[in-house]
Amino acid sequence: MSEQAQLFAIQAGARDAGVDEVGRGPLAGPVVAAAVILDPARPLDGLRDSKKLTEKRREALYDEICASALAWSLGRAEVEEIDRINILQASLLAMRRAVDGLAIEPERVLVDGNRCPQLRQPCEAIVKGDDLVAAISAASIIAKVTRDREMAALDAEYPGYGLARHKGYPSKAHLEALRTLGVTPIHRRSYAPVRRLLDGDG
């Protein structure tokens, strides 16, 4: 079965919420999840994994999704929660918060990846779902645009780290800035590069 056929097969008949998260890998900032219920009567062209889209295209699709979806919602887990319960559990928590925030009760929840959060609704995890299921692709776009915008705002609050460019991921420039400028309150202390600096081993 082709990927396009799988997309329609997975979505047929149900009022599904697609769910995806962004921000597992960064050293700084929250993990952000989105849940989206698309309107079958208003299909959107060009939906796919947000990482495979240009920033300009993501921004355009973000506006289209917000305008046409039956419902959409954001959930997040903060740096303190990531450090306390680990990034996997924080990602699942953010997803659950996103689903709980939907104004419409979904009949089923489709999650990108191989783990489902604890939900009251039926839930299915789909590996590479952000490329196979339109609603998950939409959630991926909403989550990424939201988090990218937040990291750009944090760049102004914490200048010198390059957050607007690398969005908190462990780039060479980010690691160098951590060594020279130090660890900020938005850095994840449980992540090895940050922890090493705090322990004096950086």
Image (cartoon, rainbow, N blue to C red):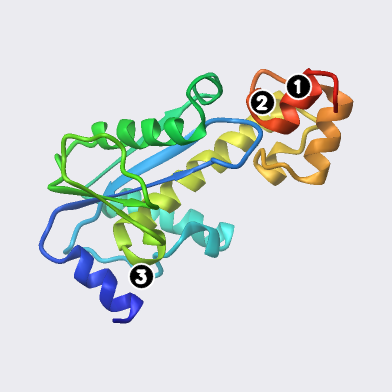
Looking at the image, which residue sits at the far right?
A: 180
Res 51 label: none
Q: Residues within 10 Å of mark 1 (few under 14, many from 20)?
A: some
**Residue 187 position in % (x across, y down):** 66, 25
Q: Image height check: is 67 above or below 131?
A: above
Q: Residues within 10 Å of mark 3 (few under 14, many from 20)?
A: few
Amino acid residing under circle 1: Val
Is disc 1 in contact with disc 3, using a CB cutoff of under 8 Å? Answer: no
Looking at the image, which residue sits at the far bottom?
A: 1
Amino acid residing under circle 2: His
**Which image quarter holds the N terminus?**
bottom left
C-alpha separation, residue under disc 2 versus residue under disc 1: 6 Å
Q: Which residue is mark 3?
A: 45
- The answer to whether residue 183 shows anywhere in this view is yes
Is disc 2 in contact with disc 1, using a CB cutoff of under 8 Å? Answer: yes
C-alpha separation, residue under disc 1 versus residue under disc 3: 42 Å
**Residue 17 position in % (x across, y down):** 24, 49
Q: Residues within 10 Å of mark 2 (few under 14, many from 20)?
A: many
Which residue appears at 78% of the width and 26% of the height?
A: 196
**Which image quarter holds the C terminus?**
top right
**Residue 162 position in % (x across, y down):** 76, 38
Closer to the chain start, of discs 3 and 2, is: 3
Q: Which residue is mark 2?
A: 187
**Residue 106 position in % (x across, y down):** 16, 44
Q: Quadrant of residue 74?
A: top left
Q: Quadrant of residue 117?
A: top left
Q: Which residue is mark 1?
A: 183
C-alpha separation, residue under disc 3 versus residue under disc 2: 37 Å
